[in-house]
Amino acid sequence: AEHPDMLRVLSDYATSLSGLGRFKEAEVLERQCLEKSRKVLGEEHPNTLVALAAYASTLTSLGRYIEAEPLQKKCLETSRQVHGTEHPASLAALGSYAETLSNRGQYSEAEPLEKDCLEMSRKVFGAEHPSALKALGNYARTLSDLGRYSEAEPLEEKNLEVSLRVNGAEHPDTLRALYNYAQTLSRLGRYSEAEPLQIKHLQLSSKSLGTWHPDTLLALGSYASALSSRGLSDEAEPLRMECLNASLNTLDAEHPATLAWLG
């Protein structure tokens, strides 16, 4: 089971589970894969770094940001030593680490890292490359989380427009761009613009990711909260109660989707 080819098979299977939203199963396999890769290949082998990044990513998908953050920081530091600062693996590690900081509410720390990631990604890949678009989306989301809505809104609108063209409507990055743009519009009080985008996002997310995927649950939680804030609690409450158990069964209690339902 420790032969490099078997590690690759194990890694591919775990990735497939993650793609299906089965993160708790994937986490067990990815932890095993990481431990074996460290033993067989060494800490600084590129495949070990891939395993470390995948494991940390699944932890974030489960909402286990406190565990993921030091792993992602380690992955970033080692990747820069092995590959260099502007290598795609290092840029991906920088983006993931900054995103986790943002998810933990450390927006002031995340913002300059995400700005650096965006600038380097545009330089290395080009402005419309999926990696650059993802970096733009993360940077704009953090601006919004910092309350800098007037800066975030045009960036998110542009990101959505280009992602629709480059990735397609049902790509996870496009769905994330749509979600973030709708959130910022709602924060700006532009509810009549935000609500149809939230509904569209729910429909597309349910179709492409599945009803109980964490991103879909998070979107449902946000939409229910938006309904509640508009005084439509009778519509919001059945949604929240219907999906709370699914969220608790699929994710950890600290995941944003779970917290959205509990809120």
Image (spheres, helix red, strand yellow):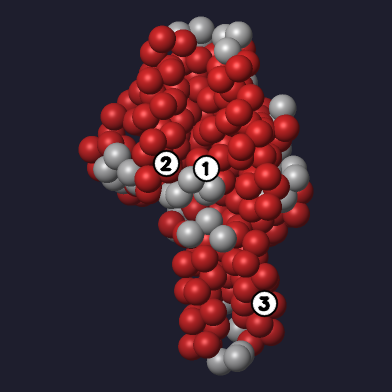
- Quarter that holds the N terminus: bottom right
Nearer-N-terminus badge (2/3): 3
Q: Could you tell me the amino acid type at mark 3? A: Gln
Q: Could you tell me the amino acid type at mark 2? A: Ser
**Residue 32, numbered label:** 3
Q: Distance between the residues labelled 2 and 1?
A: 7 Å
**Dot in front, 3 or 1:** 1
Mark 1 lies on residue: 215
Q: Does 133 appear above or below 23?
A: above
Q: Is the Cβ of the residue at disc 2 closer than 8 Å to that at disc 3? A: no
Q: Does 32 appear above or below 56?
A: below
Q: Which residue is drawn at 28% across and 36% down?
A: 164
Q: Residue at x 74, y 43 (%)?
A: 254
Give percent across and percent down for residue 262. 72, 32
Of 116 and 208, nearer the camera is: 208
Of 107 and 54, nearer the camera is: 54
**Residue 205, numbered label:** 2
How many neighbours does mark 2 have within 10 angstroms: few (below 14), some (14-19), or many (20 or more)? many
Q: Could you tell me the amino acid type at mark 1? A: Asp
Nearer-N-terminus badge (2/1): 2
Q: Distance between the residues labelled 3 and 1?
A: 26 Å
> Is residue 151 in sight in this rendering?
no
Q: Residue at x 48, y 45 (%)?
A: 211
